[in-house]
Image (cartoon, rainbow, N blue to C red):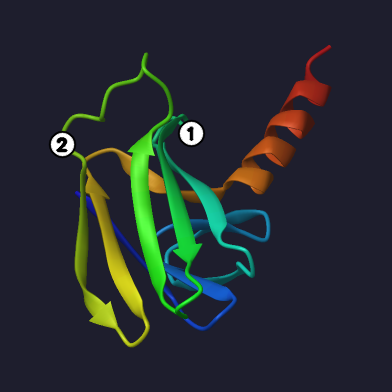
Amino acid sequence: MKTITMYGASDDLVEINGGAWYDGGWTAGDEEYGAFDGLDMFALDEADVPRLRVSAIYSRSGCWGFAVGLLDEERPWPDGWEATIRQSKGHSTVLVLSGPDLKGIITEDTWEERQENIDSWVL
């Protein structure tokens, strides 16, 4: 079972550890993402299919929170996947996402760019 941890690192960064799409490839270490106005992401399964939406929210009080939800009514919560919030790390809660076929986290913007590039390859 794979586990990915994420938290807010400052007022404009989100750190993801355990599996993230970064600079054109999958990484297993810590990656920082600019998130001045929050950050919308997808959790992908091993087949590169988005399964859950993950949002990092920076509040006016200076604290980070995370929300995890379904993509739509047609796609249920993935079997065996869990999302838990752990005790805060400074000014941020810590989201722990785990699942048997969890591959990684990708930002919504990057996902859309990848899809456009893949679609352009199809003749």
Q: Establish if 35 lies above or below 76.
A: below
Tell me which residue sits at (55%, 80%) in the image.
Answer: 11
For label 2, count other residues whose C-alpha is less than 10 Å away and answer few (under 14), some (14-19) or many (20+). few
Please give the count of numbered marks on the rendered protein. 2
Tell me which residue sits at (59%, 76%) in the image.
Answer: 12
Mark 2 = which residue?
A: 80
Callout 2 secondary element? loop
Place of residue 43 in the rendered image (x, y in percent of width and height, measured from the top left) = 42, 43
Quarter of the rendering occupied by the C terminus: top right
| Rendered image quadrant of residue 80 | top left
Query: Which of 106 and 28 lies nearest the eye of the viewer?
Result: 106
Q: Is residue 99 left or right of residue 32?
A: left
Tell me which residue sits at (56%, 75%) in the image.
Answer: 13
Place of residue 110 in the rendered image (x, y in percent of width and height, measured from the top left) = 66, 47
Mark 1 = which residue?
A: 48
User: Which amino acid, mark 2?
Assistant: Gly
Marks 2 and 1: in contact by CB < 8 Å? no
User: Which amino acid, mark 1?
Assistant: Asp
Residue reaching furthest to the left: 80
Place of residue 6 in the rendered image (x, y in percent of width and height, measured from the top left) = 38, 66
Q: Establish if 86 lies above or below 61.
A: above
Residue reaching furthest to the front: 60
For label 1, count other residues whose C-alpha is less than 10 Å away and answer few (under 14), some (14-19) or many (20+). few
Tell me which residue sits at (28%, 38%) in the image.
Answer: 101
| Mark before the other along the chain sequence, 1 or 2 | 1
